[in-house]
């Protein structure tokens, strides 16, 4: 058994795009759990766009990640020592231990995952925070009605792929926006969306208009910038914009200059920001619904896996540039 834990620390705060120099890799002696704690060997690390925000010290909905501390993140791992009766060696758990191979967690902060229901890594994606975001964002804020048109950006990704498939199962026209032909082919051919538009194709407004002949009723916005600005121009009266993410703006040094706000006014559009934590008390409801859809074959899911913790910084850079194709994970062990 190993005697060390490998950790990736936040070494400096980025200005604009992140780089590998913002991180530092260290090995530390394996910690030992105290009463009410367990030692976890992390197997999977989730990489998520919000991490870019946590690397900065700008005011946000949660405090920034601390410098010279283990970079924040969710993992799924296995309990290898327990000093709490609720957890046994061999249990698979969802943790907030961050970018490290092993760590000690308070038992109260862990959630057991049911590895018989789905592969453990799914609890970081389709059955985890991204899937839960899709569920509540679409149904509680988007409030789609059968027959309406739902557009979702970053459509092949962790959140977007679930949004479009749920919208389709709900009887809506599901239209994706994604980067490149391969992702668009996957969104239509594999995920079953009605159409997908390539935001890199150079004629987003024309292509989106053609894909949404009856206009847009719900825009589930994951990207922002030119993508959101274009969608706003095609929104129907009393349309809803679920403002879930603005990934196109996370590494920008200048704010995007929106021009489509007139549409919000004249069409009485409701645009609402969402942070998934607001549904914390109801996560179980979403996971149950998502698991049922998964079991019924109504939700297809794809992972983009990078091997080895040392490659996590590079993989986060790739995620923020659209290099991932599906939910981005790091396989630690
Ligand atoms: N509010 C919340 O509680 C909450 C929770 C989870 C996630 N989110 C947000 O949801 C969004 C999607 O997250 P995810 O985890 O599902 O990530 P993801 O979609 O799996 O991966 C990110 C994708 O964003 C797209 N992208 C990146 N830079 C872009 C740019 N400049 N212009 C257009 N597209 C760009 C890329 O897809 P293409 O190659 O297709 O462009 C990339 O693959 C993010 O904005 C994230 O912050 C919000």
Image (spheres, rainbow, N blue to C red):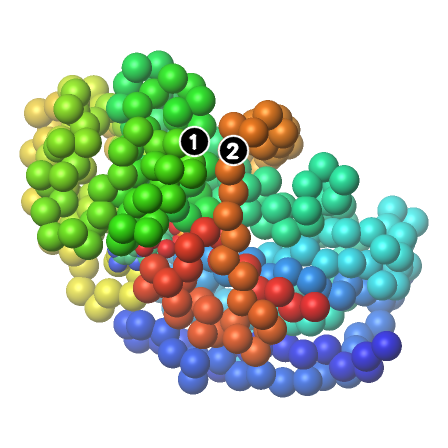
Most foreground residue, 113 or 174:
174
Helix or strand or loop: what does disc 1 sit on? Answer: helix
- According to the picture, the residue beneath numbered tag 2 turns out to be 299
- Front in this rendered view, residue 152 or 82: 152
State the residue at coordinates (32%, 44%): 185
- Does residue 219 appear left or right of residue 49 in this picture? left
Q: What x and y, as percent, mark residue 332?
A: 65, 68
Which of the 4 image quadrants contains residue 291? top right
Viewer-closest of 41 and 98: 41
Q: Is residue 292 above or below residue 1?
A: above
At horizontal 38% and vertical 78% (from top left) the residue drawn is 19
Q: Residue at x 67, y 79 (%)?
A: 6
Question: x, y percentage for residue 219?
Answer: 27, 33
Q: Is residue 14 above or below residue 261?
A: below
| Marks 2/1: CA–CA distance | 6 Å
Secondary structure type for disc 2: loop
Q: Contact (CB < 8 A) between labels 2 and 1? A: yes
Q: Which image quarter is the C terminus in?
A: bottom right
| Residue in front for this viewpoint, 144 or 109 | 144
Image disc number at residue 112 = none
Question: Left of 170 or right of it: where is 125?
Answer: right
The residue beneath circle 1 is 165
* Quadrant assignment, res 116: top right
């Amino acid at each position: 058994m190993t005697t060390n834990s490998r950790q990736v620390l936040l070494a400096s705060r980025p200005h604009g795009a992140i780089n590998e120099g913002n991180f530092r890799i260290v090995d530390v002696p394996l910690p030992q759990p105290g009463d009410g704690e367990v030692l976890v060997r992390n197997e999977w690390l989730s990489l998520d766009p919000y991490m870019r925000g946590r690397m900065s010290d700008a005011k946000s909905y949660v405090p920034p990640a601390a410098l010279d501390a283990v970079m924040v993140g969710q993992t799924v791992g296995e309990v290898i020592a327990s000093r709490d009766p609720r957890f046994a060696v061999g249990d698979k758990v969802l943790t907030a231990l961050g970018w490290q191979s092993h760590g000690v967690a308070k038992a109260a902060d862990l959630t057991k995952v049911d590895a018989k229901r789905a592969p453990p890594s799914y609890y970081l994606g389709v059955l985890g925070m991204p899937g839960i975001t899709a569920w509540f964002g679409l149904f509680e804020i988007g409030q789609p009605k059968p027959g309406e048109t739902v557009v979702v950006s970053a459509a092949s990704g962790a959140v977007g792929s679930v949004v479009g498939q749920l919208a389709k199962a709900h009887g809506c026209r599901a239209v994706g926006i994604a980067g490149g032909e391969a992702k668009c082919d996957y969104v239509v051919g594999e995920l079953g969306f009605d159409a997908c538009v390539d935001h890199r194709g150079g004629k987003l407004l024309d292509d989106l208009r053609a894909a949404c002949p009856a206009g847009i009723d719900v825009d589930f916005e994951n990207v922002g910038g030119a993508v959101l600005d274009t969608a706003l121009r095609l929104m129907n009266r009393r349309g809803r914009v679920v403002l879930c993410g603005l990934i196109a703006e996370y590494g920008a040094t200048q704010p995007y200059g929106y021009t489509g706000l007139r549409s919000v006014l004249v069409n009485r559009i409701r645009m609402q920001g969402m942070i998934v934590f607001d549904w914390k008390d109801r996560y179980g409801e979403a996971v149950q619904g998502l698991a049922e859809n998964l079991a019924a074959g109504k939700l297809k899911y794809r992972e983009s896996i990078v091997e080895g913790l040392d490659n996590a910084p590079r993989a986060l850079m790739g995620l923020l540039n659209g290099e991932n194709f599906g939910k981005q994970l790091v396989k630690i062990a």
